[in-house]
Image (cartoon, helix red, strand yellow):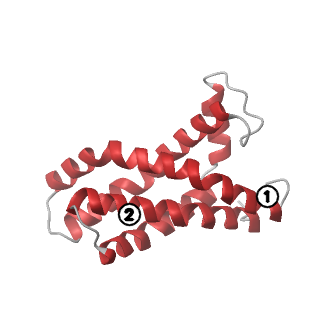
Amino acid sequence: MKITKSALVYNLLANIPICFFLSLVANIAVTGTIDWLNIAINFSLGFPIAMIVGLFVPLVRLGRWFTSLFNVKNDTYTNNLPYRFLATLISTLIFFVALNPFLSFMNTVVMNDGNFSDFFLNWLRNVPLMMAVGFVSSLVFDIPAYRCAHKIDPNF
């Protein structure tokens, strides 16, 4: 799969704030405070994974497939709210599956000497919150990232 300049710009501009807010909210949810070192560690672990997923997983094709299950017109993204919500939902789920278990394991077991049951319970407890933060931040930061990428390549 060829990585285009527009795809790289889009993924950088979308994933930087999304990964930051996921790291920030996860840190606050678990510790009740803001620990900038922990946020930086989580960001530095999660961002490369998000970039790999964003650049190599066919998210647009999966979004179109998913929205077609609901008979939603999927030929445009920006001006089509049902398509945007459903496509963002499936993309959020894909990113969640790729990122959240790994980061939860790293935070619970590797960095805090927890065990597998601690990891699993912490992961389950944070599923709704992290899905919501990922979904909302994706909705917010996707359009500016798309507009920048579209200026580079009008066919993006």
Q: In this rendered view, identify the residue nearer to me: 88 or 58.
A: 88
Which residue is at the front of the view, 146 or 54? Answer: 146
- Residue 6: x and y in percent read 75, 64
Residue at the bottom extreme of this rendering? 37
Corner quadrant of residue 54: bottom right
State the residue at coordinates (68%, 67%). Answer: 8
Report the quarter where the C terminus lies: bottom right
Q: What residue type is labelled 1?
A: His
Task: Say which amino acid is labelled 2.
Answer: Ser
For the residue pair 68 and 125, the one nearer the viewer reads as: 125
> Regarding mark 1 in the picture, which secondary structure is present there?
helix
* Residue projecting furthest to the right: 154
Q: Name the residue under label 1.
A: 150
Which quarter of the figure has residue 32?
bottom left
Q: Where is residue 76 in the image (x, y as percent from the top left)?
A: 76, 38
First in residue order: circle 1 vs circle 2: 2
